[in-house]
Image (spheres, coloured by chain):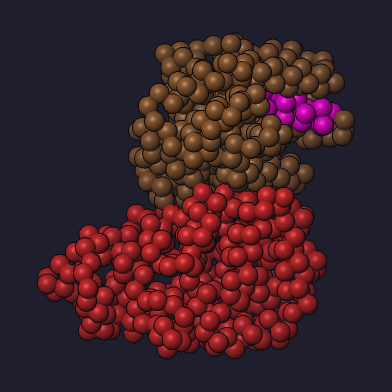
Chain colours: A red, B brown
Amino acid sequence: MQGQPAKKEAEAGRTGPLDELSAVLDSDMRQVNARILKCMESDVALIPRLARYLIAAGGKRIRPLLTLAGASIYNAPMEKVWPLAAAVEFIHTATLLHDDVVDESAERRGQKAANMIFGNKASVLVGDFLFSKSFQLMVESDSLEILGILADAAAVIAQGEVKQLTTANNIETPLAAYMDVIESKTAALFAASCQIGPVLTQAGQEQSMAMRNYGMKIGNAFQIVDDILDYSADPQKWGKDIGDDFKEGKMTAPVIFALESADEVERSFWRRTVGDKIISEGDFEAALDLINRHNGLQKSAELAKAQIVEAKESLALAPTHPMRATLLELADFVIQRAN
Amino acid sequence: MQGQPAKKEAEAGRTGPLDELSAVLDSDMRQVNARILKCMESDVALIPRLARYLIAAGGKRIRPLLTLAGASIYNAPMEKVWPLAAAVEFIHTATLLHDDVVDESAERRGQKAANMIFGNKASVLVGDFLFSKSFQLMVESDSLEILGILADAAAVIAQGEVKQLTTANNIETPLAAYMDVIESKTAALFAASCQIGPVLTQAGQEQSMAMRNYGMKIGNAFQIVDDILDYSADPQKWGKDIGDDFKEGKMTAPVIFALESADEVERSFWRRTVGDKIISEGDFEAALDLINRHNGLQKSAELAKAQIVEAKESLALAPTHPMRATLLELADFVIQRAN
């Protein structure tokens, strides 16, 4: 679930470098938030109601913070960055709304999903509204190049979500297909966010790609950790019910690693549950056992850590700046959540 | 239903001025179609499959034709117009996909709705993909001003669809609220399409507004006629089942006019059927009787005609050009469908 990371984080109370970013970038974030609130206005009352519900609940705003932090490193003109940081958050929020709708099991997740409160129709349409607003915000920033980057990211996200549809319930899904899905559905927007600073300041292709790669890799790690937490989070600590991915038959890293070492009996278990969605009581616990038997969570954490190593290598190419140090810490923080 | 006009038209075989536009603009439309096909490409097979299904079935492409025709009047550089005409069609197609999903009764319409064949999830996500692609196409055209106009139109469309949600099943809906809904959900994109030519060529505010207004008014008429046909079309002639709007409780012009003159017994009929969606056999025929008793279709047609008068007045402000003559004919043609 792409929708979960921000929520989990917000409720985790373990947000060290993110809190630091929020504090340092406080006056910029006020500008971003003002734009977010303004763009949610509409004479159709349902729109601000639904948008506010979602955005108010919306965690730490990691994507706008990355956008602002990246831009700070390159001394970008911040008044051009504010609308872009808001646009990035809107793309994310629109995706969340649509993800809730398209996900058949969203209705089982309890009262929290927006579509349960406002209806599927409203979620699709308000998502479209926010998505359109994000492009209006981009126009404000006056950079067609950035607009192209964010339009590309939006297309890649949608493609990633469709890819995820086609891998769900398919226990033959290889790790490479999983990586492809998360890079598209989650990491592409992190990458675009981080790339905005160097592109706006015309810092050159190498800088732009370094920051893009940093965003991509922490985005990958972020999603892998999220997928680990779906099989391991302490509901008390993270405020989240675990097991959603299992019920939905999502092919995520822990399951893929368990399947790699599975014998025939185990494969038939995965085929019935994740493949055919025939799930009885105790199956989730059995799944956890199988994942642990084959070190599925540990291997997933290793996968995330490797992404973080690459992220930090890329970031080292960026100019020295206090914000760069914070982003390096943030990279480590992303995988700490998994422990 | 916003989705219906193009389909009806395609199947109507009465497309005089549209056929003429298609013929005159044939080489430009080839360029537009090439861009449409290219943008549907994806290594995720479901995307081109679903997009092709919808776009292949997609009627006469009135919106790209309006874009090209408007641009021709102003001698706009057509290589900049092609991607914009494709973008307009993609915005429309994305809206159709989402409209099918959000519409609860879409599943009752038989096998034709995309979401019945490919699933709701796929329709939302492929809609998002096409929407993102439309912005990629706009970036190609290199005009932030046009990008702003189309982003505005997209936001207004989403807002209009939400407005429609809030008026559905409300028999107190006044005609003004209906006009507001159709102007947003349908006419705004016609308006933006027609405005592209004068804006690209910097023909000035008066020209831009004149063309915008022409598009807005024919868009309004187009939708009113569509709503009339939902209570009057000959299925043999138009290839469409009538009565969908009635079943869905949409508050369209024919019903609003019937309600304006309704006595208490009639109001209670509308309250039960359109208001509470409690519909029994024979109710649609009874609704038709009530609409005819109060000249609901005739009054709706008058409403559409008034829009066309305004459309033609606006278009008269545009430069003299053979294409202008065709667009004048097109205005008359839009309301001929209702007869």
Q: Nearer the viewer, residue B38 or B230?
A: B230
Percent from the top left, x then y, of residue B176?
72, 34
Q: Position of residue A268 (x, y in %)?
A: 15, 67
Can the viewer see residue A233?
yes
- The range drawn in magenta is B207-224
Q: Determine if the magenta segment contains residue B219.
A: yes
> Where is the C terminus of chain B found, in terms of image quarters?
top right
Quarter assignment of residue B259: top right
Position of A177 with respect to B195 (left or right) is: left
Q: Residue at x 44, y 43 (%)?
A: B104
Q: What residue sits 72% from the left and 50% below the top?
A: A43
Residue nearer the viewer, A84 or A51: A51
Residue B222 visible in the picture: no
User: Residue A291 sits in which quadrant?
Assistant: bottom left
- Magenta: predominant secondary structure element? helix
Q: Nearer the viewer, residue B264 or B113?
A: B264
